[in-house]
Image (spheres, grey):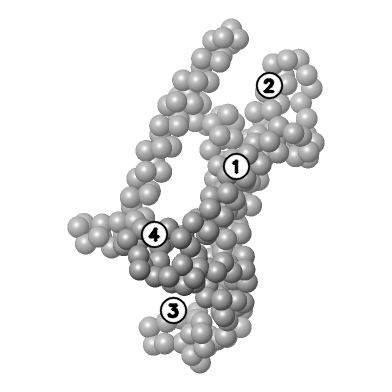
């Protein structure tokens, strides 16, 4: 167990934080939801029913989809776009998909390279783009799920006010959907942009997200 935790400490730590925060969000959201129900003279909801409700689903998924959009765009754009002096950027002479020799695929693969890096054809194409494909798939899936839970929550509010519900396609054009979506997108884009430029000038000793403390500001693609 000690060896497992040492080798997987980063993922285990953030998984534990995620689960703790998700549980905390469920308790806080449930209390807030029931307070709103009582103010309007409506029946309260049990915790089990709340975590399966559209209200909870929308609150969770609108953040998930923005996070995975951030990663999807960052993975894709850093293939070609550069930032001089940032460890978040490739060196200035490495823009693009790079050669097979640089990427150690096909005849340039090493003995310990993954099997799909050594083959040609569809399997290698899929493997060499697998990170982007999976991140994009999670983003699209969570965005779609957010839209489904969102339209259910939106229509519940409309019915409470004796208004007709709207269709899913109609909801996609509503300000309610895009306000919730864009408030998360803008914060993610700001965070990524801030990291890319602040890491040019600021340091954190020992972190792979920072350049070595003594590295010059103009050193690009150099991590600690």
Q: Are marks 1 and 4 in contact (CB under 8 Å)?
A: no
Q: Which mark is residue 105?
A: none
* Residue positioned 44% across, 79% down in the render: 114
Q: Earlier along the polypeptide chain: callout 1 or callout 3?
A: 3
Number of residue marks:
4
Q: Earlier along the polypeptide chain: callout 2 or callout 3?
A: 3
Q: Which mark is residue 114?
A: 3
* Residue positioned 41% across, 43% down in the render: 18
Residue depth check, mark 2 versus mark 1: number of the one nearer the observer: 1
Circle 3 — which element?
Answer: loop
Q: Which mark is residue 203?
A: 4
Q: Is residue 69 above or below residue 112?
A: above
Q: Residue furthest left?
A: 2
Q: Earlier along the polypeptide chain: callout 4 or callout 3?
A: 3
Circle 1 — which element?
Answer: helix
Q: CA distance from mark 2 to mark 4?
A: 48 Å
Kindly identify which residue carries mark 2: 157
Residue depth check, mark 4 versus mark 3: number of the one nearer the observer: 4
Of the 4 image quadrants, the one containing the C terminus is bottom left
Q: Which mark is residue 184?
A: 1
Left or right of 56 on screen, residue 15: left
């Amino acid at each position: 167990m000690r060896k497992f935790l040492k080798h997987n400490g980063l993922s285990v730590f953030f998984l534990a934080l995620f689960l703790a925060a998700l549980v905390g969000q469920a308790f806080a959201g449930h209390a807030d939801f029931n307070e709103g129900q009582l103010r309007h003279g409506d029946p309260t909801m049990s915790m089990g029913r709340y975590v399966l409700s559209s209200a909870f689903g929308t609150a969770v998924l609108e953040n998930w989809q923005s996070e995975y959009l951030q990663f999807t765009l960052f993975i894709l754009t850093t293939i070609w776009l550069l930032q001089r002096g940032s460890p978040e950027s490739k060196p200035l002479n490495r823009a693009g998909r790079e050669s097979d020799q640089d990427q150690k695929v096909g005849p340039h693969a090493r003995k310990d390279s993954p099997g799909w890096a050594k083959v040609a054809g569809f399997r290698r194409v899929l493997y060499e783009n697998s990170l982007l494909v999976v991140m994009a798939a999670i983003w699209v899936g969570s965005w779609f799920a957010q839209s489904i839970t969102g339209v259910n929550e939106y229509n519940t509010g409309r019915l409470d006010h004796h208004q007709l519900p709207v269709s899913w396609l109609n909801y996609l054009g509503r300000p309610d959907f895009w306000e919730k979506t864009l408030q998360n997108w803008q914060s993610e884009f700001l965070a990524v942009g801030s990291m890319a430029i602040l890491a040019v000038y600021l340091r954190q000793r020992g972190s792979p997200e920072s350049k070595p403390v003594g590295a010059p500001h103009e050193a690009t693609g150099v991590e600690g």
